[in-house]
């Protein structure tokens, strides 16, 4: 996968003209509300991000209507996470999570016929994080954050590296570590001093948007992987997402904004507009003057210079 630097500049310039909203992640329907103890907030996010990966079961959809609003995928995951948090502040304690079972996870994260995928795997990831916090940090999520001393990287002392001791956060392209960094920064619990090392958390949405926008160019073998929708090997997945991460890094530099703020925009585009069938001109609640995708004028697919390929398939708990 090659990075098209000219396309990165083009997309970055388009984004630089937008007025992006900064989400503080305080909506009580999805996250702990404002004013909650910092330790409880940190616990919520470290456990929820650990299980924030593909939620749809094979051949099904993870979606439910609650209180007159439809929640789908990660939105439903966090909706049910916030519900559990508000009902019991001890739910996300390491002591509880160290004993959580797959059956309990399935009950917690299922609603109105919607069942989250692979509940046993999610329970294992939650127990692993809980056991690590109890053993290494006295059960305090904030101690993990504080001991990073505001660094993302420092030989096994930065926050990203400390997180890699947990199975859920071992992804070599670091999607979940940087997603957690984003949440912690917005809630005022962490601010990286080595900000030049911030990255977008590369998930399926960001990969799909990158390929369609043309900021990455697949090789012949990668094009076959995308067109045939076959399951990728680990090496193929890492190579593709590493290129995507670099491309979005270049876009963020051209746009003059943090990769974490860029991630907010890209995730919304991928979730609402750039889906299996792209809806480039569909009005959406996004920062664009006349509605539609704010990247469309800089997008290869929109100008029919590329096919609207889907991201590669790779079954994992990384993203």
Image (spheres, rainbow, N blue to C red):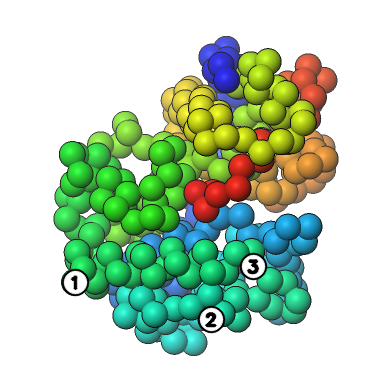
Could you give the CA–CA distance between mark 3 and mark 1, rounded to whole angstroms?
A: 31 Å
Q: Residue at x 71, y 30 (%)?
A: 226
Does residue 119 appear in the picture of this structure?
Answer: yes
> Disc 3 designates what residue?
116
Q: Residue 116, position in %: x, y?
A: 64, 67
SS for tag 2?
helix
Return the residue nearer the eye: 313 or 191: 313
Where is residue 106 drawn, in percent x and y? 60, 76
Which label sits on residue 138? 1
State left or right for residue 127 relative to residue 56: left
What residue did someone put label 2 on? Answer: 104
Mark with earlier residue (2, 1): 2
Crowdedness of circle 1 by 10 Å Cα count: few (<14), some, many (20+)? few
Q: Quadrant of the N terminus?
A: top right
* Residue 250 spot, x, y in % from top left: 47, 23
Instruction: Please state the horizontal and vertical placement of residue 150, each as a whole percent of the image.
Output: 21, 48
Left or right of 256 in this view: 166: left
Left or right relative to 273: residue 187: left
Q: How many labels does the image show?
A: 3
Q: Do the residues labelled 2 and 1 touch (CB within 8 Å)?
A: no
């Amino acid at each position: 996968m090659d990075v098209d630097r000219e396309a990165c500049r083009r997309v970055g310039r388009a984004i630089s003209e937008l007025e992006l909203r900064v989400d503080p992640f305080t909506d009580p329907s999805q996250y702990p509300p404002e004013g909650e103890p910092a330790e409880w907030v940190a616990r919520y996010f470290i456990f929820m991000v650990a299980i924030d990966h593909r939620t749809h079961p094979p051949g099904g959809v993870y979606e439910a209507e609650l209180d007159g609003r439809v929640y789908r995928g990660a939105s439903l995951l966090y909706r049910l996470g916030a519900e559990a948090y508000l009902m019991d502040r001890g739910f996300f304690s390491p002591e509880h999570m160290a004993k959580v079972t797959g059956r309990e996870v399935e009950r917690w994260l299922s609603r109105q016929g919607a069942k989250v995928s692979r509940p046993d795997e999610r329970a294992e990831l939650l127990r692993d994080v809980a056991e690590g916090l109890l053993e290494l940090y006295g059960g305090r999520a904030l101690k993990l954050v504080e001991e990073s001393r505001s660094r993302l990287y420092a030989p096994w002392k930065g926050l990203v590296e400390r997180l890699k001791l947990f199975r859920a956060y071992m992804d070599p392209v670091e999607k979940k570590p940087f997603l957690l960094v984003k949440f912690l920064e917005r809630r005022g619990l962490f601010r990286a001093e080595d900000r030049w090392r911030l990255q977008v958390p590369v998930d399926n949405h960001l990969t799909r948007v990158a390929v369609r926008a043309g900021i990455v160019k697949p090789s012949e073998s990668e094009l076959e992987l995308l067109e045939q929708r076959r399951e990728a090997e680990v090496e193929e997945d890492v190579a593709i997402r590493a290129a995507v991460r670099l491309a979005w890094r270049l876009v963020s530099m051209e746009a003059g904004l943090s990769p974490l703020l860029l991630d907010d925009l890209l995730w919304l585009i991928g979730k609402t507009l750039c889906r299996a069938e792209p809806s480039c001109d569909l009005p959406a609640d996004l920062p664009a003057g006349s509605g539609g995708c704010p990247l469309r004028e800089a997008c290869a697919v929109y100008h029919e210079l590329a096919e609207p390929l889907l991201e590669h398939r790779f079954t994992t708990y990384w993203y």
